[in-house]
Amino acid sequence: MVNNPPEKGTYLITENYRSDKGNELLIKAKDVLFALLFGDDSNHVSFTRIERELLTLTLPRFKSESLNFMQATTEISSLGTWQDPDSVSNDSRADNIILQVEYGEIEGELIGDGIVTTLSLINNLEINEQILYARMINVEQSTLIT
């Protein structure tokens, strides 16, 4: 990072706050996240996906553009309350968005591990939340065909 980025929990970290290497890493992290969630033979990604999982992300609506590359995402409006112990980003009825994506998991839950890693990078390089809430749960039944 360069140029004193905004404090965690406030604004997006835009391109002018990142070094060239930081910008490259962000692009790669988004590419890997896309491949983990949606990759198939059409984009030269091959995983033996054995079960369905649901990724749920909650973030401020004004930061959701950072993840607009994701396809097949359900967006749900929500109001959130966050009490920051450091009083940097207290929110009362904040305009949040919940993004849900169903994806295929592989043996050993390794896709989920990769999702956590890439989301951490994306958060630290762009989204800039103190806590980026992401949760993955097993989907017992679904109408999605893999």
Image: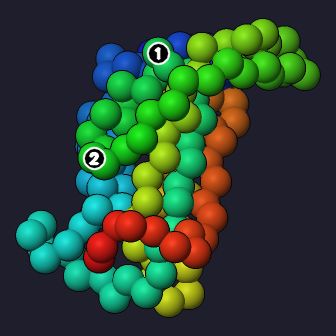
Q: Residue at x 37, y 19 (%)?
A: 14
| Image location of residue 51, percent across then percent down | 47, 81
Q: Is residue 28 above or below residue 142?
A: above
Regarding residue 15, the answer to whether it shows in the image is yes
Q: Residue at x 9, y 70 (%)?
A: 42
Q: For residue 92, what is the image quadrant?
A: top right
* SS label for mark 1: helix
Specify the quadrant that holds the C terminus.
Answer: bottom left
Residue that carries the numbered disc 2 in the rendered image: 71
Q: Amino acid at mark 2?
A: Gln
| Image location of residue 116, percent across then percent down | 55, 58
Left or right side of 103 for 47 = left
| Image location of residue 136, percent across then percent down | 60, 60
The front one of 4 and 31 is 31
| Image location of residue 12, percent across then percent down | 47, 19
Specify the quadrant that holds the N terminus.
Answer: top left
* SS label for mark 2: loop
- Among numbered discs 1 and 2, the one appearing first in the sequence: 1
Q: Amino acid at mark 1?
A: Phe
Left or right side of 80 for 139 = left
Are the residues at dot 1 and dot 2 in contact (C-beta closer than 8 Å)?
Answer: no
Q: Residue at x 20, y 73 (%)?
A: 40
Regarding residue 125, the answer to whether it shows in the image is no
The front one of 61 and 28 is 61
Q: Residue at x 31, y 34 (%)?
A: 68
Any mark on residue 62, and which?
1
